Image: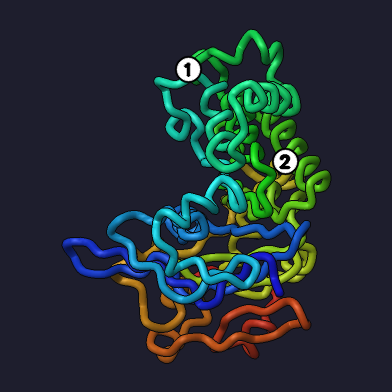
Amino acid sequence: MPLLEARHLRVDLRTHRGSAPAVRDLSFTLEHGDTLGLIGESGCGKSMTALALMGLAPDNATVSGSLTLDGKELLALPDRDWRAIRGDRIAMIFQEPMTALNPVHTIGKQIMEPLRLHQRIANAEARQRALALLERVGIPEPARRFDSYPHQFSGGQRQRIMIAMALACGPDVLIADEPTTALDVTVQKQILALIRELVDERGMALVLISHDLGLIAQNVQRMLVMYGGSVVESGPAAQVFSHPAHPYTRGLMAARPNLQHRLVAHRSERLPTFAGSVPDLFSLPPGCPFSGRCAFTEGACHTEPPPLVPLSATHWFACRRADVVLKTPELIAGSA
């Protein structure tokens, strides 16, 4: 029985314009110690997926499909039962700690809160454990800074405090949504090294969400490539990076600047791009979400869901024209 399993997970948003699918037919499984990356550009459904996994989807959202933890269905749970799981069994490092942390409470009180709520321990013990967590994540002089407020810390320190809060109760699943956004490169490396170390040490399952291909390549075993709310390619990270199959995945890989390109490229040379722009949620085609921007698009791509094409036992991509795509290994940009 998997630790966490999503089957055909879907999130629809109700708005004044009607219903819009933010996440469509997402499935994956996680065991203890697994690391899974979600990759894709802004608006592809990564963060909405994370919120659905935490039971924090917006009030105007309808979440359907199945999400189980140790075989127990979560989607039908009332808020009270979700609160018992959230922060205890499943925890999240939010994208922007300054908005996730409460500005009117000290950081010590905020780290103690999940310990007191979920583990019912006394204030004195909760304080000692919170101090140990702050020291573990690298906050200097934790006893002196315990009663400080979020605005009194740097961005990197606030992210470390968020990690301490997420790890307070020793969750089984840790979701990290863009955990290094707006941090400088040195702090990014420190934060990611800390997350990797803690996952290895505690045997947690990790869901790492990012638009940074390098970050995903270095930190996860498996990855899902998302576009338009759908998974277009899935597989072991090493296989997806070495043999990307879906035209969108290839486009992401080809758009990565590298040192060699910077050294030899003429000033006027541009990285490959796809014509057009990401469709909004109300204009997604009923077929492949990438149809129209893809150079391999044919009529049925707009109207019929693409089949899943296996490349190995663990690597697949969704494409109606897989035979042609696989015979064309180089990227072909869509036409304007």
Q: Give the residue type at disc 2.
A: Ile
Q: Label 2 neighbourhood size at 10 Å, few (<14), some (14-19), many (20+)?
A: many
Residue labelled with disc 2: 195
Residue 210 in the image, given as x and y percentages of width and height: 59, 50
> Which quadrant holds residue 276?
bottom left
Quadrant location, the N terminus: bottom right
Q: Quadrant of residue 124?
A: top right
Q: Position of residue 264 (x, y in %)?
A: 73, 44
- Residue at x 52%, y 28% (from the top left corner): 110
How was the colour assigned to the protein in this rendering? rainbow
Q: Position of residue 62 (x, y in %)?
A: 34, 67
Let me know if residue 308 appears in the view.
yes
Residue 151, numbered label: 1
Identified at 73% across, 65% down, the residue is: 31
- Mark 1 vs mark 2, CA separation in Å: 23 Å
The answer to which image quadrant residue 131 occupies is top right
Q: Quadrant of the C terminus?
A: bottom left
